[in-house]
């Protein structure tokens, strides 16, 4: 075959990854990642979730080049057109192409979800791991704070923050993050509690490791997998909260093509032009579902008991 | 008389408060000379492991004195102390961090103490415990129980301590694997002049490893005897006799 | 001669793995009468798998085959799950390593033993209670009335194992499989527990399989010993002949144990010969 020379390095890479014993730290780490990847792709639901998410991210990035329409450009002559060859998902009440808006909206939605994950994940992990490991007054104070946050439904809490901060995407991100970190902290603390008495922590203490080092290098890596899984599963909730804020007019503001805002503005035409509300709704559902599938799969992949 | 490497004077540890308090260790005293292997034998709940954890400072709430080379051990324990006293834990399946490469586990003390020639030290210490240097690039789940325990011994040796505390180091291992680990521990003690305090419930293991043996029950050291006395069944305390009889019951008449 | 109590011929167990099936048991055969048989081996030797295969307690993904697996002539391999439910606990009892995990933490000791009796033997509550108290006395629990009201976490290890024995033996099983019954216990109580087990099994005329890693203990306690390695039986011995073992594995295993009577400089670490596993399959 002609592609044999091309196959050669790939074959050796595969061997390098599959070698029974690693001969360098890099190889050992690569092998660990490789095995996790193997487990992930054998889990069909998780793999499907990952593929859908990758497609969505790709579409969000290249979307603007795929469509001839402008995201804001109004054309009242074609308002409320049902799906057709010209407008695959129809047009809205201002004659804007819905597919175009969904593609642009994917950027906003995925960006918001990613920002919340990046803010709330590390905060929750750090607070939870520290509280769980240190115990004492830090634990008491942090956990009572978490209790206060958890005693409100997250959407209500986010609403309160947005009301205080003022509507807009950035404030929505901050508000959702503020309501998203407490459950993560609680989870990380539970994990930290199970390991703080373990022999390997005791062994590290006998090597002279400081509490800071123990938390960062020993406790957090143990909490990380469940936090990653939890954040992934929470993504669906985060997206729904973001959409909810948009729907209530407190998140992204029209004419921004945020899915929740689109859903809200499509609501008044729901009985006559279903595609206005149904398409952003379907998009929200698809993203939430694929995050959930991926999260379930990650739970299996990252569980150390599978090692 | 020369100062012992490690001396425990009237060490007591209690758990809990008030009425619910349990005396885990009750006025235990012993001394271990440099290069000597001292054994503590007892059943579960006798307080033998608690003594080791009190020496290392993992249990800080003890009464009495822990003297290292004649000087009281600092409270809380500092880094100088850990450079002198190290410990090997009972269960090699839980004493290595499951998500860290062996190399990272072994690198840790070197980083904390800012030692040089790190790669060389790791390779050497692995060789000393009978493992090829490539084992540094594995994760704990890729090792057998015996290999993990060797890694745990290697970690304890990296700081070149004088005193090694061994908490049932082979009770989680098969006898054939135990033989290898015990051989390594014996060879290391001779080569490096280490002092051992070994805790075990297995009379055979303690008799093989140690020259003097303390018998513990219900938090007290009831008897201290030499290994020769133990082998010749010259124990004076009834509890020691029961223990020896129970361990011998299984010995076939050979 | 009548049927043996248990007949195992060419029992094989394999688990699915990355490359087809990997063998946990590679064709073991033995028969058992009303006697005490020891199965000795190290972790991974397949000794526990053998016990669980006889009980049909292996996970469904395990592939179990045998030319024969019969309890008093009854085919265990072909039995339905419903039939097995009667056999487990009723005709074959299993005693596990740690009673703290094997007993239900939310029920009193008495309730659990009575339940075990009433599942397999139809009888009134009062009858069950009398039998239960008698059984507790038989396993030499000093104050049975008091112990029946205790919960498993209130028992010491030795007491827990006695309760376990009482619970397992109350329906008068024909075969008792004890998997490391004393490993979690202190040396000084091990002997007592084995004595109780021995006494009960002999009184009921049952067969016993004692699975353990402890070669001296098994040879002391049993009539016959099977030494297992790598899913195969290396050697079968009359128990008191352990010092006359002929297979290099048994000899090496014996030699790796630190002796109590005299000092040795270095322990012998067994070396494994791959031909052990091939010759036995011929």
Image (cartoon, rainbow, N blue to C red):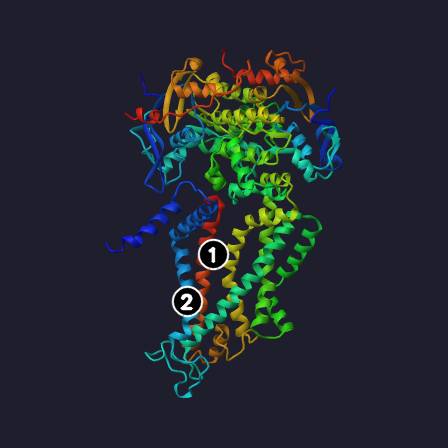
Front residue of this view, candidates B118 and B195:
B118
User: x%, y% of residue C2?
Assistant: 32, 18
Q: Residue C84, relative to residue A176: is it above or below?
A: above
Q: Residue A295: give its label.
A: 1
Instruction: State whether discs 2 and 1 lie on one chain.
Output: yes
- Residue C130: tell me if it is visible: no
Front in this rendered view, residue C140 or C236 = C236
Image spot of residue A154 (x, y percent): 58, 64
Q: Secondary structure at mark 2?
A: helix
Q: Chain of mark 1?
A: A
Q: How many marks?
A: 2
Q: Is residue A128 visible?
A: yes
State left or right for residue A49 relative to residue A142.
Answer: left
Front residue (pair B48, C107)? B48
Horizontal and vertical percent for residue C271? 42, 24
Asked if the residue under mark 1 is in contact with the one under mark 2, i.e. CB atoms within 8 Å, the reply is no
Residue at mark 2: A58
Q: How many other residues sit within 10 Å of disc 2, few (<14), some (14-19) or many (≥20)?
A: few
Q: Label 2 vs label 1: CA separation?
A: 20 Å
Residue B116's quadrant in the figure?
A: top right
N-terminal label among 2 and 1? 2
């Amino acid at each position: 075959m002609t592609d044999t020379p091309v196959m050669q390095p790939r074959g050796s890479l595969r061997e390098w990854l599959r070698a029974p014993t690693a001969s360098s730290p890099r190889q050992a780490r690569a092998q660990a990642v490789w095995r996790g990847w193997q487990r992930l792709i054998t889990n069909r639901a998780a793999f499907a979730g990952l593929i859908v998410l990758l497609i969505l991210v790709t579409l969000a990035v290249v979307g603007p080049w795929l469509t001839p329409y402008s995201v804001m450009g109004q054309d009242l002559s074609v308002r409320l057109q049902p799906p057709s060859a010209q407008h695959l998902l129809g047009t809205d009440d201002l004659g804007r192409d819905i597919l175009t808006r969904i593609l642009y909206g994917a950027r906003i939605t995925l960006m918001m979800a990613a920002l919340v994950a990046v803010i709330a994940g590390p905060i929750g992990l750090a607070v939870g791991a520290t509280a769980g490991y240190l115990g004492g007054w830090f634990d008491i104070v942090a956990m009572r704070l978490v209790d206060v946050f958890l005693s409100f439904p997250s959407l209500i809490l986010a609403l309160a923050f947005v009301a205080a901060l003022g509507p807009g995407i950035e404030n929505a991100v901050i508000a959702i993050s503020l309501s998203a970190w407490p459950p993560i902290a609680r989870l990380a603390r539970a994990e930290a509690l199970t390991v703080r008495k373990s022999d390997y922590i005791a062994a590290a203490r006998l090597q002279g490791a400081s509490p800071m080092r123990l938390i960062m290098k020993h406790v957090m890596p143990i909490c990380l997998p469940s936090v990653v899984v939890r954040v992934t599963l929470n993504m669906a909730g985060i997206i729904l909260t973001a959409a909810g804020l948009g729907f209530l007019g407190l998140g992204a503001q029209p004419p921004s093509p945020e899915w929740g805002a689109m859903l809200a503005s499509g609501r008044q035409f729901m009985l006559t032009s279903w595609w206005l509300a149904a398409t952003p709704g379907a998009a929200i559902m698809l993203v939430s579902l694929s995050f959930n599938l991926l999260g379930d799969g990650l739970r299996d992949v990252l569980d150390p008991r599978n090692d | 008389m020369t100062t012992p490497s490690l001396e425990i004077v009237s060490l007591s540890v209690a758990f809990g408060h008030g009425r619910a308090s349990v005396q885990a260790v009750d006025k235990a005293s012993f001394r271990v000379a440099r290069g000597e292997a001292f054994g503590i034998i007892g059943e579960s709940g006798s307080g033998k492991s608690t003594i080791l954890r009190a020496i290392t400072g993992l249990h800080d709430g003890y009464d009495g004195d822990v003297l290292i080379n004649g000087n009281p051990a600092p409270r809380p324990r500092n880094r100088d102390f850990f450079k002198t006293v190290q410990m090997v834990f009972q269960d090699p399946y839980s004493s290595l961090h499951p998500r860290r490469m062996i190399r990272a586990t072994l690198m840790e003390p070197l980083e904390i103490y800012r030692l040089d020639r790190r790669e060389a030290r790791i390779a050497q210490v692995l060789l000393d415990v009978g493992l090829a240097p490539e084992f540094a690039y594995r994760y704990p789940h890729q090792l057998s129980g015996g290999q993990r325990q060797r890694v745990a011994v290697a970690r304890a040796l990296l700081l070149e301590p004088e005193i090694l505390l061994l908490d049932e180091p082979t009770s989680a291992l098969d006898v054939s694997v135990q033989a290898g680990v015990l051989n390594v521990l014996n060879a290391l003690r001779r080569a490096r002049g280490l002092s051992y305090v070994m805790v075990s419930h297995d009379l055979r293991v303690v008799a093989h490893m140690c020259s003097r043996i303390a018998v513990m029950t219900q938090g007290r050291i009831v008897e201290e005897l030499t290994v020769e006395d133990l082998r010749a069944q010259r124990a004076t305390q009834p509890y020691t006799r029961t223990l020896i009889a129970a361990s011998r019951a299984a010995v076939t008449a050979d | 001669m009548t049927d043996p109590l248990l007949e195992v011929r060419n029992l094989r167990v394999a688990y699915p793995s990355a490359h087809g099936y990997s063998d946990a048991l590679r064709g073991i055969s033995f028969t058992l009468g009303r006697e005490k048989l020891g199965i000795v081996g190290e972790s991974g030797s397949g000794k526990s798998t053998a016990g669980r295969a006889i009980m049909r307690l292996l996970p469904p993904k395990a592939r179990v085959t045998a030319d024969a697996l019969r309890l008093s002539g009854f085919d265990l391999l072909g039995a339905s799950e419903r039939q097995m439910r009667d056999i487990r606990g009723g005709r074959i009892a299993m005693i596990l390593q740690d009673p703290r995990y094997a007993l239900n933490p939310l029920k009193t000791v008495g309730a659990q033993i009575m339940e075990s009796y009433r599942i397999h033997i139809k009888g009134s509550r009062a009858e069950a209670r009398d039998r239960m108290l008698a059984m507790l006395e038989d396993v030499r629990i000093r104050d049975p009335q008091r112990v029946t009201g205790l919960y498993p976490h209130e028992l010491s290890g030795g007491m827990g194992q006695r309760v376990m024995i009482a619970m397992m033996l109350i329906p008068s099983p024909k075969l008792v499989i004890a998997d490391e019954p004393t490993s979690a216990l202190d040396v000084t109580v091990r002997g007592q527990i084995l004595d109780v087990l021995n006494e009960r099994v002999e009184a009921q005329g049952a067969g016993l399989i004692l699975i353990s890693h402890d070669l001296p203990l098994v040879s002391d306690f049993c009539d016959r010993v099977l030494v297992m390695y790598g899913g195969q039986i290396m050697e079968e011995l009359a128990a008191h002949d352990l010092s006359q073992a002929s297979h290099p594995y048994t000899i090496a295993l014996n030699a790796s144990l630190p002796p109590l009577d005299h000092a040795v400089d270095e322990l012998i670490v067994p070396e494994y010969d791959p031909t052990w596993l091939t010759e036995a399959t011929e």
